[in-house]
Amino acid sequence: MAQLQVELVAVEEKIWTGEAEMVVARTTEGELGVLPGHAPLLGQLAEPGQVRIKLADGEQLTYEVNGGFLSVTSSGVTVLAETASPVTESASH
């Protein structure tokens, strides 16, 4: 199964980098799901917004982000946020 190369970067530091099956982010155009092979695009992140990174093992990482951009290229996905902080997942679904 193809994987996305993902980088989540805040102004001060690299928050997370690795391979994922899917990235979901809320942009000013609406919620966007990115899978491997997605067409290149540049989107402005909604404020406040969330970025969800779905990993191959079924785990999902969720970050609250403020400001910034989502960039999709042939080499992967980069989320450049002004601030990004992990969201603690609740046990209930």
Image: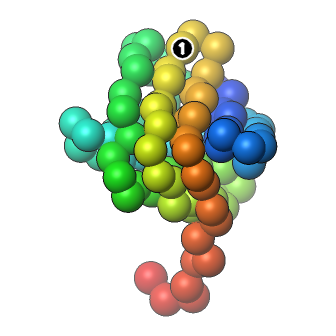
User: Where residue 88 sits: x, y (%)?
Assistant: 62, 77
Q: Is residue 35 above or below residue 89?
A: above
Q: Quadrant of the C terminus?
A: bottom left
Q: Which residue is mark 1?
A: 73
Q: Amino acid at mark 1?
A: Thr
Residue appearing at x 40%, y 55% in the figure: 49
Query: SS class of the residue under badge 1?
Result: strand
Q: Position of residue 69 (x, y in %)?
A: 46, 32
Determine which quarter of the picture holds residue 73. Answer: top right
Residue 57 horizontal side relative to residue 36, left or right: right
Among all residues in the image, which is located at the extreme bottom?
92
**Residue 3 visible in image:** no
| Position in image of residue 28 (x %, y %) | 26, 40
User: Can residue 66 be seen at all in this image of the molecule?
Assistant: yes
In the picture, measured across the screen, residue 90 lies left or right of residue 9, that is: left
* Residue under the point 58% across and 52% down: 83
